[in-house]
Each structure stands twice: as structure tokens, then as C-alpha cells.
Amino acid sequence: MISNLIRTGTIVQSRAVNGKMVARVDVHGRVTDWLPVIGTSNAFMKIYIPIVVGEQVTVLCEFGEADNGIVLRSLFSEESAEPTGMNESTAMILFHDGAKVQYDSGTGRMDVKAIGSVHMTAPHVELVCDTTHITGTLDIDGALGVGGDISTDGGITDANGDLSNFITSDGAVRA
């Protein structure tokens, strides 16, 4: 019984039951009953990461009974190795489709890679930085307020046409 207190196994099935994640684990050729999966959740914050078939886990069995255990998840293994480039100062969330959030506290750099679109909803977003560089098209639906100079390497147009060589209604040429 003592040897069954802590066992390593592989997820063979998972599902949500009444809002709780449960899984069946293959522990040395024996498949457990449905066991609860430990997650991170409290009144302050909840983090949900789906458990997947093939994930290597630890089963903690209070009395050495595997069918009464709980699943402590994710051990890195040959099938699910640590992401390339990991070190003591880098944290990374890497998704199965290639999306990634990475922060290196040694350099202070954060990288976010989305595979599809990124959607933010907030009553107010404020960017405070020394410079901002946007590659691609920037579309703004709404007013644009500028508190400084505007310069462009291209033309300027509005709904009435080209403003690059604008002449006012009284014939004055833009300076």
C-alpha cells in the first residue's frame, strides 16, 4: 500500500463532470476510475488548462488506493518536453497550435504570438512607451486626436479626395 501512495501514469480519458475536470489514468498498465484533477482556483483567480490524453501525471493516493486518488498534473516527458529556449529567467505559455506568451525577466522582454486575431475589450486602454511601431494597416473607427506633429512619406486623402496638394476654397495653396 505504501508503494501506491504516489504513482506516475498517463491520462487515457478526460471529461468535465458538474464543472469539475476528472480523468482516468493508466498507472503501470492499470486504468484508474475517474479521478479529480488538481487545478488552480480560488476567489481571486481561476486558471483552466484542459488535461489531455497522453499527458504524464502523478496520482496521489491518500491510503494507497489508486481509485481514491487525485491527479497532480503535468510532468515533462519525451512526448511532451519542455519548450525550446527555457531557462531560469523565462516563463512561457505555449499552445498546441503555436500561439505563445513568453516573458524573460533577465531581459525584461515579453513576446506574444497569436495565430489568429487578438481581441481586447476594455472601457479604456492606455499605452505608455517611448516608441510604438506598427507594421501593416492601422484602421481607426472613430476620432483621432493628435497632440503633436504628423509626418508622412505618403499622400493624405479624405472623403473629398487628395489633400497632398490641397488648395483652399479662396485659392490659397497649402504651405
Image (cartoon, grey):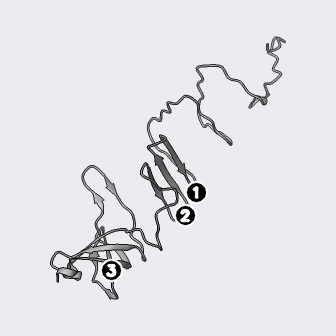
The crowd level at tag 3 (other Cα within 10 Å; few <14, some 14-19, many 20+) is many
Residue 115, numbered label:
1
Residue 16 visible in the snapshot: no
Mark closest to the chain's N terminus, 1 or 2: 2
| Residue pictured at 74% horizontal, 31% vertical | 159
The crowd level at tag 1 (other Cα within 10 Å; few <14, some 14-19, many 20+) is few
Q: CA distance from mark 1 to mark 2?
A: 7 Å
Mark closest to the chain's N terminus, 3 or 1: 3
Q: CA distance from mark 3 to mark 1?
A: 31 Å
- Asked where in the image residue 12 lies, by quadrant, the reply is bottom left
- Asked where in the image residue 49 lies, by quadrant, the reply is bottom left
The crowd level at tag 2 (other Cα within 10 Å; few <14, some 14-19, many 20+) is few
- The one nearer the camera, 15 or 162, is 15
Expressed as whole percent of the image width and height from the top left, the position of residue 79 reads 47, 74
Residue 129 visible in the snapshot: yes
Residue 97, numbered label:
2
- Circle count: 3
In terms of secondary structure, where does tag 2 sit?
A: loop
Mark closest to the chain's N terminus, 3 or 2: 3
- Compared to residue 50, the image places residue 44 above or below, namely above
The quadrant of the rendering that contains the C terminus is top right
Residue 165, numbered label:
none
Expressed as whole percent of the image width and height from the top left, the position of residue 8 reads 32, 77
- Asked where in the image residue 54 lies, by quadrant, the reply is bottom left
Tell me whether circle 1 and circle 2 mark residues in contact (CB < 8 Å): yes
